[in-house]
Image (spheres, rainbow, N blue to C red):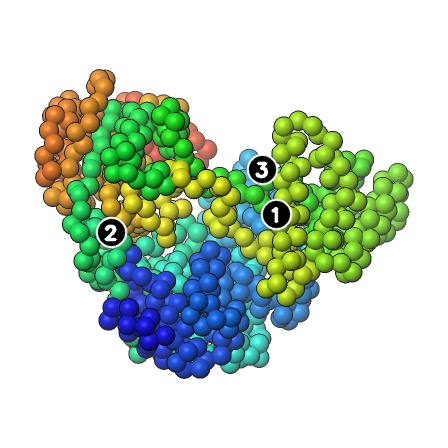
Amino acid sequence: MTNYLESLNEPQREGVMNTEGACMIIAGAGSGKTRVLTLRIAHLMHSHNVDPFNIMALTFTNKAAREMRERLEHIVGQDARNLWMGTFHSVFARILRAEAHYLGYPNNFTIYDTDDSKSLLRSVIKEMGLDDAMYKVNAVYNRISSAKNRLISWQEYINNPILTADDTANMRPEIGNIFKAYSLRCFKSGAMDFDDLLFNTDKLFKEHLEVLNKYQQRFRYLLVDEFQDTNLCQYFIIRKLASVRENICVVGDDAQSIYAFRGADISNILNFEKDYPELRIIKLEQNYRSTQTIVDAANSVIAKNKAQLPKNVWTANEEGTLIELIKAVSDNEEGKLIATSIFEEKMQQQYKFSDFVVLYRTNSQSRSIEEALRRMNIKYKVVGGLSFYQRKEIKDILAYLRFSLNQQDEASFRRIINYPKRGIGDSTIDKIVVAANDHGISIWEVLQNASSFLGGRASGLIDDFVTKIKRFGIEIQNKDAYEAAAEIGKSSGLMKELYEDKTVEGLSRYENVQELLNAIKEYVEDPEKEDKSLGAFLQEVSLITGQDEDKDNDPDKVTLMTIHMAKGLEFKNVYIVGMEEDLFPSQMMLSSRSELEEERRLFYVAITRAQKKLFLSYALTRYRFGRLKNCEPSRFLDDINSRFIKVSSKKFGGFESTPNPNFAKSFVSGMKKTVSTQPIPKPSAYRPSADFSPSDTTGLKEGMKVEHPKFGFGSVMKIEELGPERKAKINFTDFGEKTLLLSFAKLKIHEN
């Protein structure tokens, strides 16, 4: 253990050894936070003789938890397996499994993934007779999820005049009632969605103090990784758990808080000291990952944010090469230039393709990059595609397994009741659901008494289905997960259905189900798995995230992914593409300072993925929403000190139309030079009028003259209605045509 401590720098050593009381470790990018967190746990076990059963360590991905556990095993041995370590959802699910009866749930409750939740919501919306075009399931799901993450129950939601008024203003006044129906259906089905795993844990601790006290006494030390990504609900739970001893250590970096759209609340880390006045703050500021140029450039970017914890990230690494700015006429040309650059860098520096990553703000940007890479026969992989457990055939067999285990699971029932087809149509299914709702009983009770509720041919078909499910339940009780799953797959007719489809797609689906059975077999034969039951396997599957899976057998490929997906990763060479206004920063993230600062943090995260070399690119024109649009460089390029940037000397094609003749001239001029300290060319800045103040654009019409604080004066050419949204096509004198969403655009209307 001493050798490990000697290998740490002073702040890292302090983070490992100061184990008592509240501690916040502010870990700059590439500063070795995972190592510090791992060694802190090892130090507790080795030097303080803390029982691993008394330590809870919370992470955000299964991958992070696995890596930490593996590192710990190398240091302290197999005792590391006794830690309560995992994601928030997996650890809290473990608590709820033991204590669910306090909340009226069965201990074998089903965990609904996102698709299951949306399927149930879709059914609720349909049964309530609501317009699914207005009540789009994604919007409803996100609204309910957001409420739960803010610890708002359906009862509180319905009685909150601000929330209901907001829904009415958005022409969705029934969301509160949908929330209620959805929650009651989940409860009746003995199911919790992902948000419930957090919401119900908080509810359990709040309403049953004896349970809270039990876990407060058990967990003497609490450690939280990626603290900047926690939401309100997660923070309230960990604060409750740590309230007796206050031995809580949080590790994170406010500069890398980029998940507000998932409910992450940066104020948790910014205001942590307010809840713990005796807090010890330790700053890990030495970057071991990147060159001095990249670190200094990243610092110059994040310095523009006002809401942040002060720190000075530095590195002792080499100075490195300047950041290369690639400018293209079009997005297709951007792809060609990047593919060419990757090929040249690989050949000149003897890199592997896996040493390169292309990062983008939105998934749709990958098209031009992919096409260019294919044309040059460069292998690549797109991270973030459909995961194994999201494929239809896998979800079908999992639904059989889940319903065989828990007959209250409505989402699984709907998926399998007529698959493979057994003559039970939608009208029969609707009758079953209505009967259950009318009589206040579960769907399973209706199924078991089908003759009383349905009659006729349908009741006979239902009886056969019920008999089959009961037999599957016996299989689950008497056999391990693999034997039970294999029998259910065979007897349900699902395997036969897939096997008889001899198309390429059919064979692939059959092989996928076989692969699932292989995974279950591997699970059962794993000596570290004490519980070999099907229920234990299904819980593990439910908590798997797409990001944790990596099925790629050839590692030597260029990686393509969104910046959000890249967090926590590092590559020798990083390309950040689409550095244009309204793309990065996103047009949808410009309505407030907090949103803009989150976009800037996202850019900071992208920059700090690079170890050796960083490339930035933007295009003058780009197809968006089926239309060719003129583009201008991102404001974030101005945030980087120009002494860290050089303009690429690569040659370009012709210059068709550009937003501004002067900008085109500057662009061409920049291409003829390779001056390392050349400032980034940009359009002349517009200064708004002294009395500029945004007008109410409700009455904006075609032909009106307007002023924009950035684009200057222009004339409204066209107004389009997009449901509750309106957008305007405006021809600006100096910047050409722009299409702006009026709810975001700040326009002053001038009299003609």
Residue in front for this viewpoint, 2 or 104:
2
In this image, 598 relative to 118: left or right? Answer: left
- The residue sitting at 14% across, 24% down in the picture is 668
Please say if 613 is above or below 707.
below
Q: Residues within 10 Å of mark 1 (few under 14, many from 20)?
A: some
Q: Which circle marks residue 79 in the picture?
A: none
Say which residue appears at 81% left-offset and 35% top-offset. 423
The residue positioned 59% from the left and 53% from the top of the image is 541
Q: Amino acid at mark 2?
A: Ser
Q: Are marks 3 and 1 in contact (CB under 8 Å)?
A: no
For numbered disc 3, what is the local secondary structure? loop
User: Which residue is the extreme one toward the front?
Assistant: 350
Tell me how far mark 3 sits from mark 2, CA to CA. Answer: 49 Å
Residue under label 3: 132
Q: Amino acid at mark 3?
A: Asp
Q: Position of residue 57 (x, y in %)?
A: 45, 68
Front residue of 190/322: it is: 322
Nearer-N-terminus badge (1/2): 1
Hey, what amino acid is under mark 1?
Answer: Asp
Q: Which residue is mark 2?
A: 290
The quarter in which the N terminus is drawn is bottom left
Image position of 743 (left or right of 90)? left
Res 357 visible: no
Q: Quadrant of the C terminus?
A: top left
Q: Are marks 1 and 2 in contact (CB under 8 Å)?
A: no
**Mark 3 or 2 closer to N-term?**
3
Which residue corresponds to mark 1?
Answer: 116
In the figure, residue 710 lies in which quadrant? Answer: top left
